[in-house]
Image: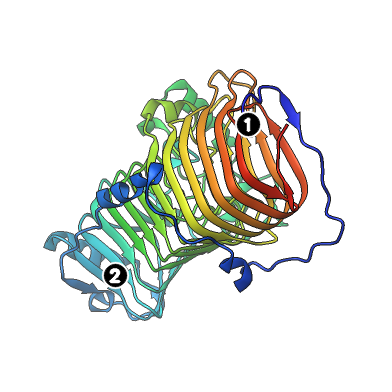
Amino acid sequence: MTGLNRRVFLQSLVAAAAVPAIPGALSQAVAMSRPPRAQYNGPWAQVPKILSAIKLPSIPARDFNLKEFGATGEGEDASAFFAAAIEASRKAGGGRVVVPAGKYRTGPIHLVSNTELHVAEGAEVHFIPEPERYLPAVKTRWEGMEMMGYSPLIYAHKAENVALTGKGLIDGGADCDTWWPWKGANTKCDNSSNEGDTQHAARAKLMEEMEAGVPVADRHYAEESFLRPPLVQFYECKNVLIEGVTLENSPFWVIHPVLCEGVTVRGVTTRSHGPNSDGCDPESCKNVLIEDCLFDNGDDCIAIKSGRNADGRRVNVPTENVVVRNCQMRDGHGGLVLGSEISGGVRNVFLEDCVMSSPHLERGLRIKTNAMRGGNIHDIYVRNLTIGQVKDVIVINFFYEEGDKGDFDPNVYNIQVENLVCKQANRAFQIRGFERAPIRGLQISNSRIDQAGSLGVIEEVTGLTVNNVTINGQAFKPG
């Protein structure tokens, strides 16, 4: 259907009978309802090309076992041993720093080119939650703004061929006594408040300096600023691999590649339920594969980003050519999310064969932006998505946070969703564009929502195409 230029409020359809809750893991019957994988033709023909452009890191075949540098794996502070092993790898031209079974406490770990940090099965790396250890400040990007801030817990800058692998556990050490209270009042920590040591003042000042064009080197936001670091951040890197590890209790976002080219995130579990505990946030990255992962988070599971407001437009690097497949999403604010730091744009995103479900999953697919962030967001393709329980199925919102208060209208077009099956939702749609800048070319086909409390809202969309879509057992015909 085309020509939805006016505001359209869809009628509510409440299920006649109570709907039983579906647990986070989908039943076999639901999982089996997914259609077989389609062929890579049409727009999807780009997927093999993207995958062929992604290069795994080339790591020299030599190992640097942490115990050979003095570590015992008995819970000691192993910071010096990590640093020594990584330095030995650097001097040798690269290799694999092996963390054998055992328990290791440490401060920040800075990786270098041609080096893999391998956390073996049975190994536990626990980061020490003492902020002074994450100094001196490094160049980082925080909520889409560049600054000099606390070091991410695992960090690499301008490295090529860098990896984090293994079946071990990496614990960021954050909880409601350390790191998370800096958020201020939040739903994760009942004892936190808006008073005292919180991020609010520094966050506001950083936004002011960003808009004023203060050079990044002069934006000092480490000690006493209370801006929490991410658990893993690879910044301006090439050929990145994160595989197999379990990542828990992050101070902030869990996996955050920034300005990277060639990123593979495979077989990873992120389990962090603190404030802003996004699972994986590729930001201003090119050629990204996220596959076979489990996301169980306190915020978005996957959030594709490209910088906030003036910084996003100044750097002006979109995230593009992203493939997400065979992933599971449980708790989170959203399963696949684009935004909200999206001023540099996002394009060519392909999600297929994923499963989402949780009583605490708020949205299945979500695009969030506003008139201050703007962004060119287009060519987003989703297919073969199974959702068990979710609050909202599809959300495209131009009124996120600041809403219609800026001069940078979002440009969102060509969003295609096919073969989506949802068992239970509170609301099918929350889709709101601007009258002056409507969402264009939203296509939904061969999909069904078995039980929805309401259809929700579609507002300011042109080129809405619906084909073979049912909601509550009835053909969906927007009008």
Q: Position of residue 332 (x, y in %)?
A: 61, 55
Q: Which residue in the structure is indicated by mark 2?
A: 81
Q: How many marks can you see?
A: 2
Question: Label 2's element?
Answer: helix
Tell which residue pokes out farthest to the left in this image.
Answer: 92
Horizontal arrangement in the rendering, residue 76 relative to residue 444 (left or right) = left
Visible in this render: residue 114? yes
Horizontal arrangement in the rendering, residue 206 relative to residue 23 (left or right) = left
- Residue name at image x 27 percent, y 74 percent: 66
Q: Residues within 10 Å of mark 2 (few under 14, many from 20)?
A: many
Q: Position of residue 42 (x, y in %)?
A: 39, 43
Identity of the amino acid at label 1? Met
Q: Does residue 366 sit above or below 375 in this rendering?
A: below
State the separation of the CA atoms marked 2 and 1. 63 Å
Which of the numbered marks, if any, corresponds to residue 24? none
| First along the sequence among labels 2 and 1 | 1
For the N terminus, which image quadrant? top right
- Residue name at image x 51 percent, y 31 percent: 413
Question: In front here: 431 or 400?
Answer: 431
Q: Does residue 225 sit above or below 54 in this rendering?
A: above
Visible in this render: residue 252? no
Q: Position of residue 205 (x, y in %)?
A: 54, 31
Horizontal arrangement in the rendering, residue 465 relative to residue 102 (left or right) = right
Q: Which residue in the structure is indicated by mark 1?
A: 1
Horizontal arrangement in the rendering, residue 274 relative to residue 117 (left or right) = right
